[in-house]
Amino acid sequence: MKILGIETTCDETAAAVVARLDGDEPSGHILSNEVLSQIAEHAAYGGVVPEIAARAHVEVLDRLIERALDKAGTTLAELDGIAVAAGPGLIGGVLVGLVTAKSLALVSRKPLLAINHLEAHALTPRLTDGIAFPYLLLLASGGHTQLVAVRGVGDYVRLGGTIDDAIGEAFDKVAKLLGLGYPGGPEVERMAEAGNPERFALPRPMLGRREADFSLSGLKTALRIEAEKIAPLARTDIADLCASFQAAVVDVVADRVRVALRGFDAVAGRPTALVASGGVAANGAIRRALAAQAGQVGLSFVAPPLPLCGDNGAMIAWAGIERLRAGLVDDLTAPARARWPF
Ligand code: KG4
Ligand code: ZN
């Protein structure tokens, strides 16, 4: 089984071909994975500009798909389906990907798989590590933060989520506040490496609460107040602020995951693993805390390799394979969705 995956929901244009062999082969094979980041086009604005994103997707998507097929050594006719992220995301970009995928599905008479971008992040660890259901997932990106019991394809139980900012969004806002680049996560992490995490006593919102929810906007405000007190900021101040912020996030994540692990049994039995996915799963400090957390309860910790943590086409293609195998095919009326709860 071989599927093309198309991703255009935010600021990455991506196309990939993923195969899955029949038989006892547990996971997929990435035959090609082309990603074109628009970061340079948005950097001057400190965030993603939807109109610029949609136009940039239009300009490169067809060539990127051609390249993904070439590199995979395959053709449209040889595919088993066309998968595309149909949301949630910036609607202009989503439409570019969806209309392209529908056209390809129509001319090639292949099944269309309209994928929820979040579901694709959630299933990526099965592509990379072949892990079995059920598992506890921390899905953390620029727009979403959720703890989910993944019981099967299309079978997800939400155990907690953020009541305000997503974790990636908090990193991005802190970066902006401190004059660092976009996207903020990698910048803050890099600065934090040289900083003192104990210099600023930032709050740990929601710590100890019985529900596995997150709240991050208060943490960001507390950081802004500390930054204002010591302005103008020297480079060491910025490093210390980043380190203190990241340490607070790590403590909160570890605590919330502990609570979710406790609630997991009741909805899904014993998990096979603790899994992190989405752009924030690229953060080394968060990965280390989650690995320690999993170790304490005798679970393994799984996170996709860095290039597959952020947005990419392979995760969409893989979700397409999982859904096609489960008989969950879409037709050409599948809508583009700016919001799409998962
Ligand atoms: O999944 P993703 O590529 O796109 C969305 O669907 O949102 O996630 C992007 C988010 C951004 O907010 C970015 O700042 C964050 O992931 N991120 C990180 C790191 N790398 C990316 N956050 C913390 N530490 C990182 N190393
Ligand atoms: Zn994403």
Image: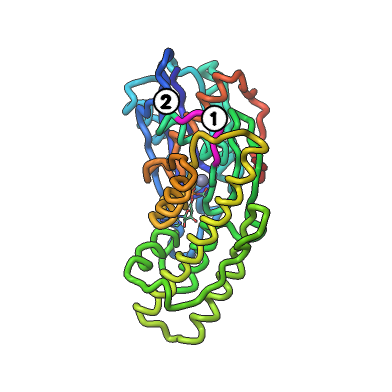
> For mark 1, what is the residue?
133
Q: Which residue occupies 50% across, 28% down?
A: 132
According to the image, label 2 marks what residue? 27
Instruction: State the extent of the magenta-drawn residues as a range.
Output: 131-136
Indicate the amino acid at tag 1: Phe
Asked whether residue 170 is in view, the answer is yes
Q: Nearer the viewer, residue 164 or 253?
A: 253
Q: Is residue 204 above or below residue 263?
A: below
Callout 2 amino acid: Ser
- Label 1 Cα crowd, 10 Å radius (few <14 / some 14-19 / many 20+): some
Q: Secondary structure at mark 1?
A: loop
Per the model, the C-alpha gap separating discs 1 and 2 is 13 Å
Q: Quadrant of the C terminus?
A: top right
Was residue 132 drawn as part of the magenta stretch in this picture?
A: yes
Q: Is residue 133 above or below residue 39?
A: above
Find residue 84 and report its image quarter: top right
